[in-house]
Amino acid sequence: MTDPLRFCEPKSHARRLDKIPVERLKSCWMKLTQVRYFSHASLILICCCISIAFAARAAAAHFSLLDWIELSPNDPPPARSYLAMTYDPVSGKIIAFGGFDGTGYLNDTWSFDGTSWMQIATQSAPPARAAAQMTYDSVTQKVVLFGGYDGTNYLGDTWLWDGSTLQWTQATPQHHPPAVTGPMLFPDPNGRADVFGGFDGQFYQLTMWQWSGSDWTQLSPSTVPFARASAAVATNTSTGQVVMFGGLADVNPNNTWTYDGTTWTLQSPAVQPLLVYAASAAFDPGLQRVVLFGGGSGGVDQNTTWLWDQVGATWTLLSTVQPPPAREGAGMTYDAALHRVILFGGQDNNGNFNDTWELIPTATPTPTPSPTATLTPTPTPSATPAPRATPRPRPTPHPRPTSP
């Protein structure tokens, strides 16, 4: 059986880091019998809490007007997972590259215009790989692709996609991040492309680099997230805030981090998604929220949709009527031409997907159940250590390809 990512042992051996017991609540009757003993100030505090609860319910009702719709585009790419996918403003289309189809690694390039997928014939292309990532650099107006795994090697090459010529060019930087699978690439608030973390075959990484257009420069923020790979990451392009959640790691990655272009901050939301790796994330300007979908959690693929609100620093579980089937390793991005978040591909225990979905407003509100979520752990952030400071990881989950 081929391993498309080479993180470690199968997901069935994964440690259940995502299960944290929650203390039982007291009965409503007990609470009511104690009200008469509260001070006047306590009663005011209770009223405020009730107001907040109603406001939260109203916000949930607002977002319940969203739902996933499966599209039926012409000529979709063959089924695959762990592809790289992003929106290219120059061509005005979504660009998808590579991935794993269950038997081999791919290096084909596809575009999506909202109606049809089209394979693009290029003069050259990055070598076949899975678990690479790419993002748009608005300064150079190129899509930057980095990292991945080809079945034998962890990759550290950099490729640039030009939306005006529809061609790939291999960059030749003097410096580059470590060769890794599952890095996190995202737009820096300054418009450049940043990369964080990944797994190099021995260590989870916690270094951060920025693409200058011709070379990689290592950044040294005072605090960085714990080393990890295959985390969900997206940038709020309206405010410049980056949010990162989950992933694979030796030190517990069940936490939410934000980055403002200078400093990483460990957030403490009241609830958050289950710990997931290889989940998909994208920022929707219309919602002013980062959308997080799916991912693997404790050996079980998820199909929940969560929204991150920067202003409130909160995660909200979105109730949808017909979400995409549970999966990990899907491509997801916001299409600025369509004004929609688009999801494609991924895998579950039965194989790979080639379906295309969009998240859109709906006319009829849907009920919003109380979310079942993990309490947020409160680890202490650490100062930026030297590169490759994490120990060799213990067995951690990885995707299982289908047998050929």
Image (cartoon, rainbow, N blue to C red):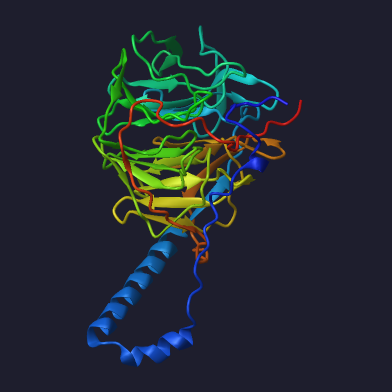
State which quadrant residue 53 falls in. Answer: bottom left
Left or right: residue 382 compared with residue 303 = left
Q: Is residue 256 left or right of residue 305?
A: left
**Residue under the image location 69 percent in, 40 percent down:** 349
Left or right relative to 33: residue 403: right
Q: Looking at the image, which is closer to me, 277 or 8?
A: 8
Q: Give x and y (percent) for residue 138.
A: 30, 25
Disc tally is: 0
Please provide percent x and percent y for residue 3: 65, 26
Residue visible at 53% across and 40% down? 277
**Is 44 on the left or on the right of 122, as rendered?**
left
Residue 261, percent from left and from top: 25, 35
Q: Is residue 112 visible?
A: no
Q: Residue furthest front?
A: 391
Q: Is residue 75 above or below residue 237?
A: above
* Residue 58, quarter of the rendered image: bottom left
The quadrant of the rendering that contains the C terminus is: top right
Observer able to see residue 172: yes
Task: Please provide percent x and percent y for residue 110.
Answer: 54, 23
